[in-house]
Image: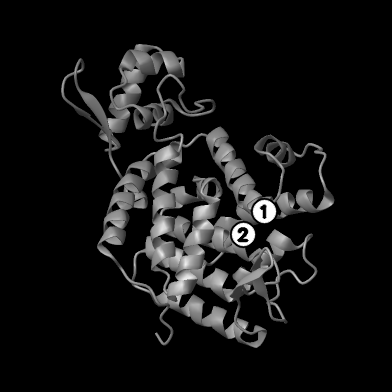
Amino acid sequence: MSYQPPFDITPAILNQVSLISEKVGELSVKERFLSPQLRKTNQIKTITGTLRIEGNSLTESQVSAILDGKRVLGSVLELAEVQGAISAYEQLNQFDATCVEDFLKTHDLLMGDVLKNSGKFRSQSVGIHQGKKVIHVAPSAHKVSGLIADLLVWLKNSEHHPLITSSVFHYELEFIHPFMDGNGRMGRLWQTLILSRWKPVFQYLPLESIIHDHQQDYYQALGQADEEANATPFITFMLNAILQTIEKNALVNASVNAPVNLKGMKTTEAILALVAQRSSITRKEMAQWIGKDLRTISRAIKQLQEQGLLNRVGSDKTGHWVLVLRSQFE
């Protein structure tokens, strides 16, 4: 590789990568049981968070209404921003994170009704202002396509952990500032895309919402990275934000008193979903939540055990269930 973004791998970063990997592994086994309602709730948080960073005033309830096709009162610009974000995030799993055509297509989806030259690199110089002060002058417009091409090649070939490469890409995109508008939204969305290619559960984690909660720290980390000409401060910030997202995600703290939506699930699927939430759940509790008798529950458990999907550790009274990970969750 010819281009190497400047950053350092500190002991603190390595520790965070290890901790996040462990916690996201715990989430991944539960990811296929994530209820449609929770996925939708997190998508709403993601879209609202990334747009509020850019000054959009629409609330989560308004974004939810737009997602449901309901009419919402608001400015034409803000409504268009929400529709663009919905389109981009809904198609996230179709994009190749290392493809420039997909990169431009995503920007067009995100900004098509907001920006005249959406989906095209900027053709003029830009600077980022804080009040009347210029805090960042982006590279010349004629360099943008080459810089993005180099960055995508680096991303494709990098042997660094996705937690690191996604953060570096996010920072470098903000530094290059390839578009006239929508750069912050693209940086956050593309980091989510890169992470979801590593662990699909990231597609449903509202990382952008946590960034919004720490918006000033986000800008401070970008500024510090600019000053040091090194992405390390931004990597550190993003890893902390990712860890907070995982820890605050509703699935982590889900209680069996508020189970996933079991409607439409087969008995075996419903059992796995409940076990994913609480390993100590009893057969009687399963029967109550699923609405089946104990004999049906026992037959389904036996089937899952024979298929190697569920194990029992300890006695019926004091033991617990163990979900068996398959390769797609590794």
- The answer to whether mark 1 and mark 2 are in CB contact below 8 A is yes
Q: Residue furthest left?
A: 314
Q: Is residue 189 visible?
A: yes
How packed mark 1 is, by other alpha carbons closer than 10 Å (few <14, some 14-19, many 20 or more), is many
- Residue 196 vertical position relative to residue 213 in the rendered view, above or below: below
How packed mark 2 is, by other alpha carbons closer than 10 Å (few <14, some 14-19, many 20 or more), is many
Q: Residue at x 30, y 68 (%)?
A: 9
Q: Is residue 146 left or right of residue 246?
A: right
Dot in front, 1 or 2: 2
- Residue 314 vertical position relative to residue 220 in the rendered view, above or below: above
Q: Observer-nearest residue: 133 or 298?
A: 133
Q: Is residue 193 visible?
A: no
Q: Earlier in the sequence, mark 1 or mark 2?
A: 1
Q: Residue at x 42, y 51 (%)?
A: 242
Q: Which mark is residue 319?
A: none
Q: Observer-nearest residue: 74 or 133?
A: 133
Q: Residue at x 55, y 71 (%)?
A: 173
Q: Quadrant of residue 179?
A: bottom right
Residue corresponding to mark 1: 85
Q: Is residue 12 left or right of residue 130?
A: left
Q: Position of residue 287 (x, y in %)?
A: 39, 15
Q: Label 1 vs label 2: CA separation?
A: 9 Å
- Residue 235 vertical position relative to residue 2 in the rendered view, above or below: above
Q: Position of residue 241 (x, y in %)?
A: 44, 51
Q: Observer-nearest residue: 291 or 180?
A: 180
Residue corresponding to mark 2: 185
